[in-house]
Image: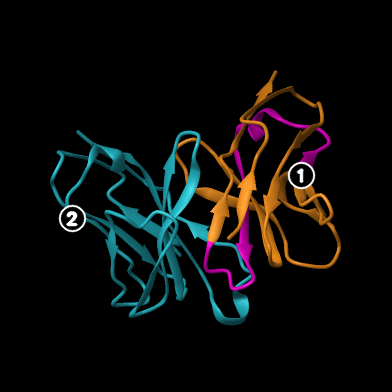
Amino acid sequence: AQSVTQLDSQVPVFEEAPVELRCNYSSSVSVYLFWYVQYPNQGLQLLLKYLSGSTLVKGINGFEAEFNKSQTSFHLRKPSVHISDTAEYFCAVSDRAGNQFYFGTGTSLTVIP
Amino acid sequence: NAGVTQTPKFQVLKTGQSMTLQCAQDMNHEYMSWYRQDPGMGLRLIHYSVGAGITDQGEVPNGYNVSRSTTEDFPLRLLSAAPSQTSVYFCASRLTGGYSNQPQHFGDGTRLSIL
């Protein structure tokens, strides 16, 4: 089985500052990795995904993430955040069959004007 | 194109009542799944289906039943609701086969309170 740990439950950051949301996973098999964003009272939307190949993955809204196999991490970054980035962010992992998804507990990002 | 549609959006039940949460998708996705979201717990997989007539358990299946008679619909049933099932429920879908690496499309959720 896989598991996902998001180390920070809440991250406050000032507008236009950089941000990093941390995600570590554990798995005995090769996995796919995802970051999703959830705005209030909405479902989850995909930000980016890592399947294979280049370890630096770029997503929507200026976000990127880096896969580090040796540290089993998939941290999400943005060089300059906006007020509209305030939301809950979830890291997720699935096995290569893609039938079982495991989500982290989420990180609440609050952008301060 | 409606995507994934969940009904109802809100529901209040009494302990012991039964309830079916509806989920429908119009993208011809074979894979469909149900999650519950609880504070500090993230999303946890309840049941999933890889096609009509095929269902399987996820991480937290107890107290829930599912069936998949059509590709479009994947209802979630609570036979005897308990307060511990108070949660926000999300349905999601995606393609299967060679598309197992594709992300899931999520509905907007059903907020269920059990008194």
Question: Residue B89 appears at what percent x and percent y?
Answer: 37, 48
Place of residue B57 in the rendered image (x, y in percent of width and height, measured from the top left): 39, 65
Closer to the camera in the image, B102 or B86: B86
What kind of element bears circle 2? loop
Q: Is residue A84 left or right of residue B71?
A: right
From the viewer's perspective, is A27 left or right of A69?
Answer: left
Please state which amino acid type lies under the numbered disc 2: Leu
Please report the bounds of the magenta region as a residue range: A76-100
Q: Is residue A39 left or right of residue A110?
A: left
Which residue is label 1 attached to? Answer: A75
Report how many numbered discs are placed on residues in the image.
2
Chain in orange?
A: A
What residue does disc 2 label? B79
Residue drawn at x 17%, y 50% is: B80
Instruction: Tell me which chain the residue with mark 1 is part of.
Output: A
Q: CA distance from mark 1 to mark 2?
A: 40 Å
Q: Residue at x 28, y 70 (%)?
A: B67
Q: Residue at x 59, y 45 (%)?
A: A104
Circle 1: residue type: His
**Dividing the image into 4 quarters, which one contains the N terminus of chain A?**
bottom right
Quadrant hosting residue A5: top right
